[in-house]
Amino acid sequence: MANTILIGAQWGDEGKGKIIDVLTESADLVVRYQGGNNAGHTVELPSGKYILHLVPSGILRPGCRCVIGNGVVVDPVALVEELQGLERVGIDVAGRFFISDRAHMVLPYHKQLDELREDLKGVGKIGTTKRGIGPAYGDKAARVGIRMGDLLNPALFRARLKDRLVEINDIFRAHGWEEISDRKLADEMLEATESLLPMITDTVAIVQKALSDRSGILLEGAQGTLLDIDMGTYPFVTSSNTTSAGACSGAGLPPHRIDDVIGVMKAYTTRVGEGPFPTEDQDLSAHFHGMGREFGATTGRPRRCGWLDSVALRFSSQVNGLDRIALTNLDGLDTLETIKIATCYEVNGRRIDQFPADIDTLRQCVPVYEELPGWGEDTSGCDDWNALPENARAYLARIEEITGARVTIVSVGPRRDQTMFR
């Protein structure tokens, strides 16, 4: 397998977990390179449904090695619980799961700060999962973060935690919150994370060894392009670089060694949380929710649903350098008579075809649609590209025109066998 980056091409929840799982059949090493346990990747196997938050989806393939890279922020207690859950269902991670010693930790006070900041915003809230991801990345940028490798030296961990809690407790006192005991928290964390210590290592060395051995590396992203801290709908974004560029810095991989960039996208568009969403459609949301679809794997919140947005997709294709597309949830459109694609936006009587950086401009954007005929057939049983209805293939061809990237993978259901390659 080539060295491949797999990213979300929309606002997240595109079905990356399933596509990663399918691709890991030929991957030697899967590296998660950004985000935290605010992501949820769902994989459905004959043995059951698995929702993974931090552990790369490749862990479900017995021969696949998995890495949490330095660009991830790790809630170590949540990670222990996730690993224990995998072990309970017979998935052995011993000797094939590694955690970067450079990855920063999400600690309990990060989650408290996340909740505090969100509550203070009121109507201007971001819609965060309140899992401490933003504050942890903030500490990293401010150079006051605590890293996973610090757990390997308990005395150092205790000293750094004590220093950090001086400022944290000042903030808590100002808001009437109970102060945190550095000794108590250190004791709790060191006890809770003891099982992780053998897994914490220099994962850059693992990635570089895989390069020299010409092993196939699959880089797994979380969230989606339009939630990228730089390229997304700021400030309604996540706190990391979700685009393909973030994969190299988040994993310790040089850019010139990337062979393939795959963008995962739904056959329509969804978004969770706050922020502008030009093609949002309440009737389409009701359609998918009525099917029991489009509820967040991490939060359980109903996703906002809308028609395919070619303006956003062109932007995503450009900034990621997409080589090809994996399209999911095509079967969700099976019963619709007409399918819409937004070809451009209209703002104050002026048409634009570039995705605006300014959030207020994006809020004013009214999508201009073209309509395509639906196919009115159940595609969930299709196992070959040519078995897809003609109108479905025409829809895929239109997406290729929009993005400039070839659609080479189509998913028509949650199972591995509901996947077609081209």
Image (cartoon, rainbow, N blue to C red):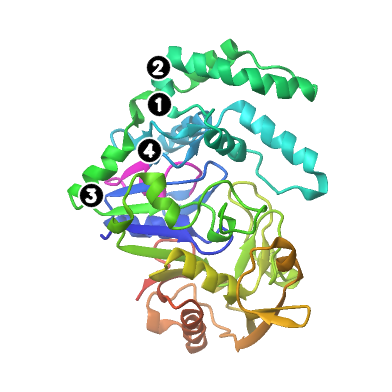
Labels 3 and 1: the sequence-earlier one? 1
Label 4 packing within 10 angstroms: few (<14), some (14-19), many (20+): few
N-term mark: 3 or 2: 2
* Kind of residue indicated by mark 3: Leu
Q: Amino acid at mark 2?
A: Asn
* Residue drawn at point x = 58 percent, y = 70 percent: 312
Q: Position of residue 4 (x, y in %)?
A: 33, 59
Question: What span is colored magenta in the figure?
Answer: 50-67
Does the CB distance between marks 4 and 2 fall below 8 Å? no
Look at the picture and state if 382 lies above or below 90.
below
Q: Secondary structure at mark 3?
A: helix
Q: Which residue is mark 3?
A: 211
Q: Position of residue 147 (x, y in %)?
A: 46, 28
Distance from the alpha carbon under mark 4 to that under mark 3: 30 Å
Q: Give the residue furthest to the left.
A: 213
Element marked by disc 2: loop
Which residue is nearer to you in this view: 36 or 418? Answer: 36
Q: Tell me the element at label 1.
A: helix
Q: Are marks 3 and 1 in contact (CB under 8 Å)?
A: no
Q: Quadrant of residue 110?
A: top right
Disc sitting over residue 90 in the figure: 4
